[in-house]
Image (cartoon, rainbow, N blue to C red):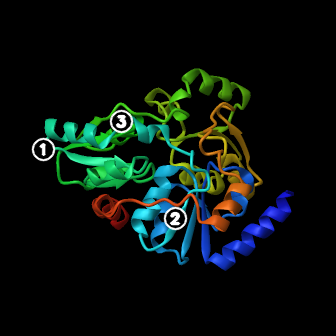
Amino acid sequence: MPATSLIDEILSLKKEKDAIILAHNYQLPEVQDIADLCGDSLELSRAAATRDGEVIVFCGVDFMAETAAILSPEKTVLLPAPGACCPMAQMISADELRFAKARNPDAAVVCYVNTTAEVKAESDICCTSSNAVKVVNSVEQDRVIFVPDRNLGRYAARFTKKEVLPWEGFCIVHDQITPAQVAAARQAHPGATLLVHPECRPEVIDLADHVASTSGIIQQACTSPEREFIIGTEVGILHRLAKECPEKQCYPLSQASVCQNMKKTDLAKVRDALQTHHPRITVPKEIADRARGAIERMLAL
């Protein structure tokens, strides 16, 4: 079916179902274009908690839709691509976290939002890539178990006096970016400003001009006086950059920085989800109630 026909169907169904469409900055361009809001995990978490609408269509990966379902249990939350998972979120289980807590009873647990609801339920507070430093510094304890992203945990540790114990998880896209790729990009685009995501390895972060979440990268590129940027994150962000600051030149640090799970959602799946209310994401109440506390403590900051 032509894209224009699909878009017309989606817009009609959205009105009929009283739905909002949320899309992460890594989604396909055509999915970003039909969303009511594009953003990073923090922006989308806030929207899920505050936006009106009986139905939330979450164009992202599984943990994002779970977060929306936890924050809005009275709403219907749909994940158009049921196989869209986050490999990092699968790198820690609730049982493993309980074991780590038992080994470190004096430590707070700061849980990256890129985790399952069960892991959030075992955590003291959640964080995103844009507020990880603020969250780590907000807890009373002097020691922090940071799960599951070792790179984000080590980045946050640079800006706190607390002892941070990072879990050995990682983003399979950002963790593959290397200093050699940075050198090649710098050579190809001399004078361009390098913006990277804090899920990158420490040795890559050390080479960056600025480190920020996806929305932070967009804000930096759009407001900075510089004209050229090398973008060290998933390539889906380049679409939004081209729309929001078309006068700037933005180059991918690596063309290979593609999250296949973020690309599983397409217009047909969004249409089908709105038509059928499937796949619907729900979280058991006993887990959701505990996880909600960790998320709401983050949002309160």
Question: Image height check: is 187 above or below 271?
Answer: above
The residue closer to the viewer here, 219 or 287, is 287
Residue 97 locus on image (x, y percent): 26, 40
Identified at 23% across, 54% down, the residue is: 139
Q: Is residue 276 left or right of residue 49?
A: right
Q: CA distance from mark 3 to mark 2?
A: 33 Å
Identified at 49% across, 67% down, the residue is: 48
Q: CA distance from mark 1 to mark 2?
A: 36 Å
Furthest residue in direction top, as rendered: 180
Q: Does residue 245 appear in this view? A: no
Identified at 59% across, 52% down, the residue is: 220
Question: Image height check: is 270 above or below 26?
Answer: below
The earlier-in-sequence mark between 1 and 2 is 2
Snapshot quadrant of residue 298: bottom left
The residue closer to the viewer here, 95 or 177, is 95
| Neighbourhood count class around disc 2 (C-alpha, 10 Å): few under 14, some 14–19, many 20 upward | many
Q: Nearer the viewer, mark 3 or mark 2?
A: 2
- Name the residue type under label 3: Arg
For the residue labelled by badge 3, is the local secondary structure a helix, a strand or a loop?
A: helix
Q: Which residue is mark 3?
A: 154
Q: Nearer the viewer, mark 1 or mark 2?
A: 2
The earlier-in-sequence mark between 1 and 3 is 1
Question: Image height check: is 159 above or below 31?
Answer: above
Residue 254 locus on image (x, y percent): 65, 31
The earlier-in-sequence mark between 3 and 2 is 2
Q: Which residue is mark 2?
A: 77
Q: CA distance from mark 1 to mark 3?
A: 20 Å
